Image (cartoon, helix red, strand yellow):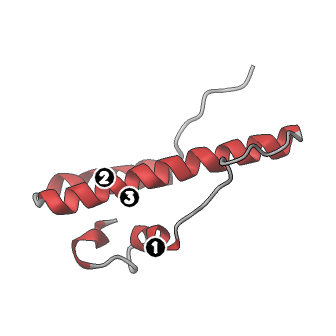
Amino acid sequence: MSEPLALSLGQKFELERMTRAIDATGDPQVLRGLAKQLLQAWQSQKAATQWVMRQQLGAPARFGTELAVDSGLLDALRPEGGKGGMDIL
């Protein structure tokens, strides 16, 4: 049986940094935009995980489950690529 997933030290620091940035943001519009970005990133990660699992198992791809990453989302998630109040990540 395999070990449960655990965050690396770097991931723990990044999580803490992002948590503090969210806590420091009082603008509801910025928080709403951030929530939408995180939701998109979460769904993209789930799709990527499913894709990798299918590749490992040799299973055929199912329609509508392919990974589609929005390049604007990736730019917004990069510290140097954000715009306005969205560059807290």
In the displayed structure, would residue 73 be above or below residue 18? below
Residue highlighted by disc 2: 35
Q: Amino acid at mark 2?
A: Ala
Q: Residues within 10 Å of mark 3 (few under 14, many from 20)?
A: some
Placement of the C terminus among the 4 image quadrants: bottom left
Q: Residue at x 13, y 56 (%)?
A: 28
Mark 2 vs 3: CB contact within 8 A: yes
Q: Amino acid at mark 3?
A: Gln
Secondary structure of residue under mark 2: helix
Q: Residue at x 17, y 61 (%)?
A: 29
Residue highlighted by disc 3: 37
Q: Amino acid at mark 1?
A: Gly
Residue 25 visible to the viewer: no
Q: Residue at x 39, y 80 (%)?
A: 80
Query: Quadrant of the rendered structure where residue 58 is?
Result: top right
Residue 54 visible to the viewer: yes
| Mark 2 vs mark 3, CA separation in Å | 5 Å
Q: Count up the numbered dots.
A: 3
| Mark 3 vs mark 1, CA separation in Å | 10 Å
Q: Position of residue 22 (x, y in %)?
A: 23, 54
Disc sitting over residue 72 in the figure? 1
Looking at marks 1 and 2 on the same chain, the residue that comes earlier in the sequence is marked by 2
Looking at marks 3 and 1 on the same chain, the residue that comes earlier in the sequence is marked by 3
Secondary structure of residue under mark 1: helix
Placement of the N terminus among the 4 image quadrants: top right
Q: Is residue 88 left or right of residue 23?
A: right
Q: Position of residue 9 (x, y in %)?
A: 49, 49
Of all residues shown, which one is farthest toward the left? 26
| Mark 1 vs mark 2, CA separation in Å | 15 Å
Taking depth in this image into account, of 58 and 80 the one nearest to the observer is 58
Q: Position of residue 84 (x, y in %)?
A: 23, 78
Of all residues shown, which one is farthest toward the top? 1
